[in-house]
Image (cartoon, grey):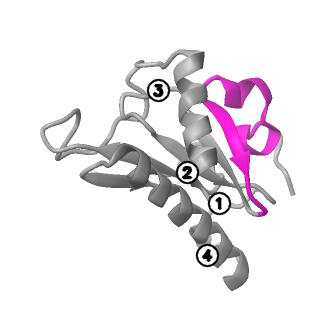
């Protein structure tokens, strides 16, 4: 069941404040985060229901969702060649299962620490579309 007020369930203006839908799979929505302080940062959100935790999914659903996370992670590694990819699955405020994938580089911004949710480093529409296009091309 979809939940009112959840940006991942309802899409629209709330989601558009922080992300752009790059593409969908059977199980997930891949969203490019508008704050691109970490070039290539994306979110993989569970799309079929308002689910708050991996343990709420069946084995099949969980495997499909994590396969999508892995697919996007592989694409980010291929495209941006980070030294490390940080994964964040918080959900304290929105409560919808989603995982942030944040590429990081040795001696780069926030290396050795937790990434900030929003630094205010918003990419242009063209830069966002470039990230979306690269992810679409490399996620198979």
Horizontally, residue 47 falls left or right of residue 140, namely right
The disc at residue 91 is 2
Q: Which residue is mark 3?
A: 35
Quarter occupied by residue 40: top left
Q: Position of residue 95 (x, y in %)?
A: 63, 51
Of labels 1 and 3, earlier in sequence is 3
Q: CB atoms at circles 1 and 3 under 8 Å apart?
A: no
Q: Foreground mark, 4 or 3?
A: 3
Span colored in magenta? 5-26
The answer to whether residue 131 is above or below residue 74 is: above
Q: Give the residue displayed 53% in from the left and 34% down from the top.
A: 131
Q: Magenta stretch: residue 17 in it?
A: yes
> How much space separates mark 1 and mark 2, taking CA atoms?
7 Å
Q: Magenta stretch: residue 22 in it?
A: yes
Of labels 3 and 2, earlier in sequence is 3
The disc at residue 52 is 1
Q: Give the residue displayed 68% in from the left and 25% down from the top.
A: 16
> How much space separates mark 1 and mark 3, taking CA atoms?
24 Å
> How much space separates mark 2 and mark 4, taking CA atoms?
14 Å
Q: Which residue is mark 4?
A: 55
The disc at residue 36 is none
Q: Position of residue 111 (x, y in %)?
A: 19, 42
């Amino acid at each position: 069941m979809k939940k009112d007020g959840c940006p991942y369930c309802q899409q629209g203006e709330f989601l558009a404040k922080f992300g752009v839908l790059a593409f969908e799979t059977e199980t997930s929505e891949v969203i490019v985060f508008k704050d691109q302080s970490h070039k290539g940062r994306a979110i993989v959100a569970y799309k079929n229901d308002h689910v708050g935790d991996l343990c709420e999914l069946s084995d099949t659903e969980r495997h499909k969702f994590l396969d999508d996370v892995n697919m996007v992670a592989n694409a980010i590694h291929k495209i941006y060649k980070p030294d490390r990819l940080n994964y964040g699955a918080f959900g304290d405020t929105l409560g919808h299962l989603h995982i942030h994938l944040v590429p990081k580089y040795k001696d780069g911004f926030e290396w050795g620490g937790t990434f900030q949710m929003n630094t205010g480093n918003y990419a242009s529409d063209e830069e966002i579309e470039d990230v979306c296009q690269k992810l679409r091309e490399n996620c198979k």
